């Protein structure tokens, strides 16, 4: 997913001069609000955009760990959700065991995810958590330590998980869910490194963001977040325009006005979109 930084100028579809477009959008939103009856008791609507996938559950099916989850947006009191399921999760011995002590170092791997939320198409690279656990460091750490020791003996992950009792298996699945969500939350600090302008097929641009590798402490475990190849986790966001593509339209307006720049964080970009929504 290598993109080139291209000049911030183009013409495409229905997106016109950006600064005029943004100004027009703001004016229309403001005009609409001007005709809203005053209600001194009403609270302003809170808008939120959760663009990084949230894992809602991990299940063990047919010898595999599979993740399900969603991305969501709350806009003007209405919730929009896109879900995913069947995303492979794997636990392996890390190739480099030089820092291991009483427990083997593990790689917790999450396969790539692609979702479209109101015209913001999110694609993640593979995501890996290199986990250093310690015996006696907590329930999840003990479970992962035991899995690592059995993997060292050549026992397959499927056989290891099948042998767990129902309580330990559920504790492991819940712990892995929390661990992945704790790591994924850091992706809001991913840095915009490249913008590829498209201007065709209702697509205005692809934003390329990178984070890491990053050292974290999650649930008492030492964790390194990377892309499973000792490189940064990548998040590509494609802005798409058209009917029903509210967030994509807003992103494309901001890009067309040159209001998003290299070095912005993902959270910063979302804050700009939220600012337009709140007008």
Image (tube, rainbow, N blue to C red):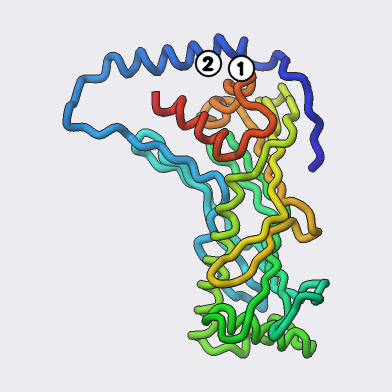
Disc 2 secondary structure class: helix
Asked whether residue 210 is in view, the answer is yes
As drawn, 73 above or below 173: above
Which comes before the other along the chain, label 1 or label 2? 2
Give the left or right position of residue 158, taking residue 50 as reference. Answer: right
- Residue in the image at 53% along x and 31% along y: 247
Q: Residue at x 74, y 56 (%)?
A: 227
Judged left or right of residue 199, residue 20 is left
Q: Assess disc 1: are there few (<14), some (14-19) or many (≥20) residues with their C-alpha within 10 Å of its C-alpha.
A: some
* In this picture, residue 244 sits left or right of residue 200: left
User: In the depicted view, which residue is nearer to us: 127 or 215?
Assistant: 215
Q: Secondary structure at mark 1?
A: loop
Around disc 2, counting alpha carbons within 10 Å, would you say few (fewer than 14), some (14 to 19), or many (20 or more)?
many
Q: Are marks 1 and 2 in contact (CB under 8 Å)?
A: yes
| Residue at the image point whose x is 58% and y is 21% from the top | 253
Give the image location of residue 87, x and y in percent.
64, 61
x, y (%) of residue 201?
70, 26
Q: Which residue is mark 1?
A: 257
Residue 18, located in which quarter of the rendered image? top right
Question: Residue at label 2?
Answer: 22
Tell me what residue is drawn at x 40 percent, y 37 percent.
47
| 187 versus 111 height, above or below | above
């Amino acid at each position: 997913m290598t993109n080139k930084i291209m000049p911030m100028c183009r013409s495409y579809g229905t997106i016109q001069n950006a600064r005029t477009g943004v100004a027009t959008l703001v004016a229309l939103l403001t005009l609409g609000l001007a005709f809203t009856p005053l209600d001194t008791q009403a609270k302003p609507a809170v808008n939120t955009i959760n663009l990084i996938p949230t894992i809602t559950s991990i299940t063990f099916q047919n010898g595999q760990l599979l993740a399900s989850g969603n991305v969501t947006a709350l806009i003007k009191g209405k919730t929009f959700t896109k879900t995913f399921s069947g995303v492979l999760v794997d636990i392996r011995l890390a190739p480099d065991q030089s820092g291991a002590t009483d427990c083997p170092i593990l790689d917790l791997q999450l396969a790539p995810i692609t979702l479209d939320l109101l015209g913001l198409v999110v694609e993640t690279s593979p995501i890996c958590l290199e986990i250093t656990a310690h015996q006696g460091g907590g329930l999840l750490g003990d479970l992962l330590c035991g899995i690592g020791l059995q993997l060292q003996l050549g026992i397959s992950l499927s056989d290891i998980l099948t042998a767990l009792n129902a309580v330990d298996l559920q504790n492991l699945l819940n712990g892995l869910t929390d661990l992945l969500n704790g790591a994924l939350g850091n992706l809001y600090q991913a840095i915009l490194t490249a913008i590829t302008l498209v201007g065709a097929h209702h697509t205005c641009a692809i934003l390329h963001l990178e984070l890491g590798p990053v050292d974290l402490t999650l649930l008492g475990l030492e964790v390194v977040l990377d892309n499973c190849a000792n490189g940064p986790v990548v998040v590509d966001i494609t802005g798409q325009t058209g009917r029903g593509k509210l967030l994509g339209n807003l992103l494309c307006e901001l890009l067309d006005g040159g209001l998003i720049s290299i070095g912005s964080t993902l959270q910063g970009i979302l804050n700009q979109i939220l600012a337009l929504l709140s007008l």
